[in-house]
Amino acid sequence: MNVYDLRLHLLRQLIQQHGGLAAFSELTGIDKSTLSRCAGRNPSERIGTRLANRIETAIGLKPDHLSDFSTLIDSGGKLPADMLATAHPAQKRLISYLLHYPIDATTARALLLLARRRRS
C-alpha cells in the first residue's frame, strides 16, 4: 500500500459518492478522460500530487486529504479490508500497533519522517 493506492481508493469513493465519473468530472472541472485514466477500472496513470491537489481544492477537501492514510480509518478505528489486503506484512503490523496504542504528536511526526524516507 502506497500513497498512489490510497489516492486511487479515495478517488474512487469520491466519484461514487458524487454520482459517477461524468458528474464528478463536471463538479471538479477535470476532464472525464483524465479521471478515467487515473481511477477507471484499469488505471493507466497514477494520481499525482498536482491532480490530487486540484481535486481537493475543487470539492473543498482539506489539503492532502487524498494522501492522508488516516482518512481511511472509520469511527470504530478500523481500516477497509481491501486496503489492508494490499499492505506489506510489516505495514500491517505497524498499522495494527498504531490503531491500538495512541501516540503523541512528536512520535507521529517521527513516524511520518521515517515513512517518507527513501533508501539510497
Image: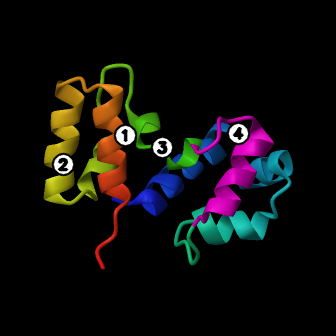
Residue 32 x/y as whole percent: 78, 63
Disc 4 target residue:
18
Crowding near pointer 3: few (<14 within 10 Å), some, many (20+)? few
What kind of secondary structure does the magenta stretch mostly adopt? helix
Q: Residue at x 67, y 67 (%)?
A: 36
Q: CA distance from mark 4 to mark 2?
A: 31 Å
The mark closer to the camera, 1 or 3, is 1
Q: Which residue is mark 1?
A: 109
Residue 83 location (% of width, % of height): 33, 50
Q: Is residue 115 above or below residue 10?
A: below
* C-alpha separation, residue under disc 4 versus residue under disc 1: 33 Å
Q: Nearer the viewer, residue 30 or 96?
A: 96
* Residue 20 seen from this side: no
Sequence-first disc among 2 and 3: 3
Helix, strand or loop status at disc 4:
loop
Q: Residue at position x 18%, y 48% from top? A: 92
Of marks 4 and 1, which one's residue comes earlier in the chain? 4
Q: Are marks 4 and 2 in contact (CB under 8 Å)?
A: no
Asked whether the viewer can see residue 50, the reply is yes
SS for dot 2: helix
Few, some or many residues within 10 Å of mark 4 (<14, 14–19, 20+):
some
Q: Which range of residues does the magenta coloring cover?
A: 47-64
The residue pinned by badge 3 equals 68
Amino acid bearing label 4:
His
The label number, if any, that marks residue 42 in the structure image: none
Give the residue displayed 36% in from the left and 28% down from the top: 105
* Magenta stretch holds residue 50: yes
Q: Residue at x 29, y 74 (%)?
A: 119
Nearest the camera: 38 or 62? Answer: 62
Mark 2 or mark 1, which is nearer to you?
1
Q: Secondary structure at mark 1?
A: helix
